Image: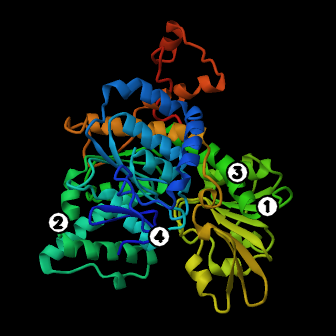
Amino acid sequence: AMPISFTWLKVSGVVWNKRGSKLPPSIMADSKVKDIGLAEFGRKELKLAEHEMPGLMETRKEYGAAQPLKGVNITGSLHMTIQTGVLIETLQALGATVRWCSCNIFSTQDHAASAIAKAQTASVFAWKGETLEEYWWCTEQALTWPGKDGPDMIVDDGGDATLLIHEGKRREEAFAKDGTLPDPAETENAEFKCVLSVLRESIQKDPTKWSRMAKTVRGVSEETTTGVHRLIQMAEKGELLFPAINVNDCVTKSKFDNVYGCRHSLPDGIMRATDVMIGGKRVVVCGYGDVGKGSAFAMRGAGARVIITEVDPICALQACMEGFQVATLDDVIGEADIFVTTTGNKDIIMATDMAKMKNNAIVGNIGHFDNEIDMAGLEKVSGVKVENIKPQVDRYEFPDGHGVIVLAAGRLLNLGCATGHPSFVMSCSFTNQTLAQLELWKERDSGKYGNKVYLLPKSLDEKVARLHLPALGARLTTLRKDQADYIDCQVEGPFKPDTYRY
């Protein structure tokens, strides 16, 4: 069922606001945002962000006149923040028509969503604090194009838009075969129950919607580690329905967004949520991949004593060589003050672990999904009491009186409790997203890309970096021709082989 807590509702072709007054038809009627009155504030911040996002602004200058995305319908499922607003308006400036939802129930910045909706640069279905049911409703709305079978292209973050299409097609085939409808009771996972509810209702209205949509989509560019993992799994099984570009593993994404973005936004989220002094505290960072590295350096920079947990011996050795203690969670569960999960895996901190923590230990996650921390198990602990301190900050008190402070209900704390990564580093990520969309669309009929997962060429990775250097006052040295020949590269690059790990 359609949610009701929106600024705009459209009934029988007439647009109303929530006070019951008719609104001018120029308003983006099919956007669903929390408060359109925040649009002016959002636009001011968008203008500031544009200055901090030179990659996207240069991309508009380079490609805008040619309109390479003219007539292309793009659906995005990615945190609806100010920075994402600049991405949306870049795609629109290159000719695309855009529909957007967030990929996290807590990550939307309502003023950003409102600014985009009011400017009509995209239809937006997102607000901070969605329920799971509302979240999947928004995802379906972003994928549903009036008068068309679906989007031409997808910008995805975590793979939820891609998942809904694939699962929808699979369930439609089952329905066509023997009349079987998706049943939410078949799973214990609260989120997948919502997926099945959406598909159950959809199939009864239009039993070939997702199958037609799967044929319409020409490609997806995926933002994050977990989403790429999903895509690779589907491709290996021969189940991927359209080509995919792995934006996450562009160097100017993974080594910048994941490392430097987290280095900035993790302490921002913890401090906004709790105002706790990080200096002197013992902080456990679970995982020492790119996200873990950025998180660990941030905590050490704030004066914390940092302990790493790892399963990978190479990452563990890296942590040791950087001066971090490497231990198991059991070693330090009763001593540490702050716990941060960064792994991209599941069941990292369980309810039984949180029961052993010291009073008011802080527990948060900066990996993509919400299954690193056992929230379902925590809520089922006999006698546990939950006290909401403020939005996205909850204290769970155990029967013995001690408690833990959980940030953003186990979801991304940097977006739930703060504003995510800063504009400059997101400019690197989102310039890659834009170039990936351009590449997939340009080559849609050339046969260059099959239904597999691809990386952007290193020359484009270097281009993204090059676009950001002038803003930092950096001046590159230029190779002489004999020097380039000596290391077997072109004067203008690429400078490193694909095996180089930076």
Q: Which mark is residue 9?
A: none
Q: Spatial distance from mark 4 to mark 3, Cα to Cα?
A: 47 Å
The answer to whether the residues at label 4 and label 1 have Cβ atoms under 8 Å apart is no
**Vertical relation: 170 (above or below) 108:** below
* Mark whose residue sits in front, 3 or 1: 1
Decide which of tag 3 and tag 1 comes sooner along the chain. Answer: 1
Q: Amino acid at mark 3?
A: Ala
Q: CA distance from mark 4 to mark 1?
A: 31 Å
Mark 3 in CB contact with mark 1 (< 8 angstroms): no
Say the numbered circle drawn on residue 5: 4
Disc 2 is placed on an element classified as loop
Q: Is residue 24 left or right of residue 291?
A: left
Question: In front: 14, or 215?
Answer: 14
Q: Is 453 placed above or below 128 here?
A: above
Element at label 3: helix
Location of residue 268 in the rendering, given as x and y in whole percent from the top left corner:
71, 53
How far is the residue under mark 3 from the one under mark 1? 28 Å
Quarter of the image that includes the N terminus: bottom left
Count how many numbered circles sit on residues in the image. Answer: 4
Query: Which label sits in the foreground, 2 or 3?
Result: 2
Q: Amino acid at mark 4?
A: Ser
Looking at the image, is 383 positioned above or below residue 417? below
* Label 3 environment density (alpha carbons within 10 Å; few <14, some 14–19, many ≥20): many
Label 1 sits on residue: 275
Q: Which mark is residue 208?
A: 2
Where residue 498 sits: x, y (%)? 45, 33
- Mark positioned earlier in the residue sequence (2 or 4): 4
Residue 296 visible at all: yes
As helix, strand or loop, the secondary structure at mark 1 comes to: loop
Quarter of image, res 450: top left
